[in-house]
Amino acid sequence: MTYTYTWTSAEESSLRREDEAGNVAYVPVAEGNRDYAEFVASGAVVTAYVAPPEPAPLSTEEKVNRLLSDYNLTRTELRSLIA
């Protein structure tokens, strides 16, 4: 079976292993770990970790909607609490 390996973080403490069928497993970098030993013995190349992009900042409308949702409030209820 062929695997593709990718670092899961900049610290390189864990590998993401994916097979041809898209099955994913996470392999800790530890000497006693059988999967890690298999990886080292295979000589496979690891794809570098790429940090996800920063999320776009929320608009005022999105912030209000999140607040309403978090506290299960309507806009009228929120207005009455602020006034």
Image (spheres, grey):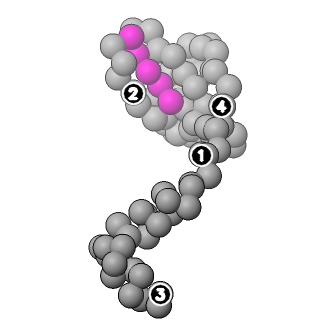
Picture layout, residue 28 above or below residue 38: below
Asked if residue 41 lies in the magenta stretch, the reply is no
**Residue 53 location, x and y as percent?**
64, 38
Q: Is residue 50 visible?
A: yes
Magenta stretch: dominant SS? strand
Q: Do residues under tags 4 and 1 come within 8 Å of each other at their CB atoms?
A: no
The residue tagged 2 is: 24
Q: Residue 55 carries which label?
A: 1
Picture layout, residue 66 above or below residue 45: below
Q: Residues under labels 4 and 2: Cα distance?
A: 16 Å
> Looking at this view, is 74 or 5 the one in front?
74
Q: Residues under labels 2 and 3: Cα distance?
A: 48 Å
Counting residues from the N terminus, which is met first, the one under dot 4 or under dot 1? Answer: 4
User: Is disc 3 placed on a helix, strand or loop?
Assistant: helix
The residue tagged 3 is: 82
Q: Which amino acid does label 3 sit on?
A: Ile
Closer to the camera: disc 3 or disc 4? 3
Q: Residue at x 47, y 90 (%)?
A: 83
Query: Which contiguous range is marked in magenta?
Result: 16-20
Q: Which mark is residue 49?
A: 4
Q: Residues within 10 Å of mark 1 (few under 14, many from 20)?
A: few
**Residue 61 location, x and y as percent?**
50, 59
Picture layout, residue 64 above or below residue 9: below
Counting residues from the N terminus, which is met first, the one under dot 4 or under dot 2? Answer: 2
Q: Residue at x 39, y 87 (%)?
A: 80
User: Is disc 1 placed on a helix, strand or loop?
Assistant: loop
User: Is disc 4 placed on a helix, strand or loop?
Assistant: loop
Q: What residue type is labelled 4?
A: Tyr
Q: Do residues under tags 3 and 1 come within 8 Å of each other at their CB atoms?
A: no
Counting residues from the N terminus, which is met first, the one under dot 3 or under dot 1? Answer: 1
